[in-house]
Image (spheres, rainbow, N blue to C red):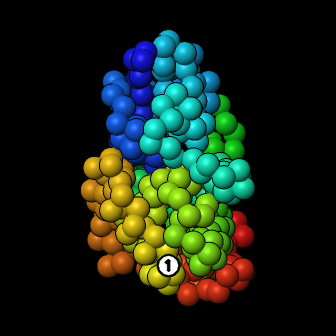
Amino acid sequence: MDELILYHNDMSVCSAKVRMALAEKGMEWESVHLDLRAGDAQRSEYVALNPSQLVPTLVHGGRAVIESNVICEYLDDIQPEPPLRPADAYARARMRLWTKQLDEGVHAAVSTLGLCIAFRDQYLARDPEEVQRYLANLVDPARRQRIAHALEFGMDAPGFAPALERFVRLFADMDAALARGPWLAGAAYSLADLAYAPYLARLEHLGLDDMEKAHPRVGEWRARGARLAASGEPEPTRASTVERGVRRQRALAGDARALVHPLNRRALALTLRAPAGAAIAGPTQ
């Protein structure tokens, strides 16, 4: 097989899912680690591979494959064993509906929570002009605005409460799916299960794992996945950097939640106990 080169970042949840898929397949790969805060993903040589300026990017036989969910399916195509997609067409469709959700809001939500709670201070410690250049060079205006709001407002950002609400819905959906079978897409472990593991790990590192504790089936599912993981990173992405950011926030006020805008504080409290579908109010700025 032609050489596999993965451009990735150790803190990226999308990179983690691809590393997990590579490990499940037992595939050898060359690592090219990008420093995202230094703007490595904005450099011209990387943009030539991935115009979206995102990680990861897989290069196989000199050809680039982008988007983590697409990469995972690509790996399953080029090395079918062990399979990471259900054999049954309906179960495979269910798997894709789960991975589709990641691209349609779940990823943006976890990025917002991570920026607001843990990573904001790393940006604010840098030269303001450098941060402004970084933001100006982002090609996706929605991503630029989301990051700018997180940096300016922290946990008071207008996207913070909707991000929490997205995870309220997600945990309810996962709980319902797992009531019907051991894995998200049915009877077999699949890319759906692999893809969500980094997101739940990130919530735990951010101190937001109360939502998981409120849904025991989700916790049991996660434990099953950790036992199966061939990757050596059943809790993918480094916890230490995230948790350092959370500790810095808590050091300022004893508890990160005490720093939250009163309306977002209510949103956070509701998130941890809200029934599925409950509306969560957030700040209006």
Name above or below for residue 210 compared with residue 60: below
In screen coordinates, is 240 left or right of 6? left
Relative vertical location of residue 129 with respect to residue 242 in this rendering, above or below: above
Q: What is the three-letter code of the residue carrying label 1?
A: Arg
Kindly state the secondary structure of the residue where label 1 is placed.
Answer: helix
Closer to the camera, 129 or 217?
217
Could you tell me which quadrant the N terminus lies in?
top left
**Residue 285 appearing in the image:** yes
Q: Is residue 4 above or below residue 125?
A: above
Residue at x 59% of width, y 51% of height = 86
Position of residue 116 measured from the top left corner of the image (x, y, whole percent)? 49, 60
Residue plotted at (36% across, 41% down):
23
Q: Quadrant of residue 40?
A: top left
Task: Pick the quarter of the image with the C terminus.
Answer: bottom right
**Residue 76 to residue 242: above or below:** above
Residue under the point 45% across and 58% down: 197
**Residue 132 visible in rendering:** no
Q: Which residue carries the number 1 mark?
A: 217
Tell me residue 169's x, y (percent): 65, 72
Give the image location of residue 106, x and y in percent. 61, 57
Image label count: 1
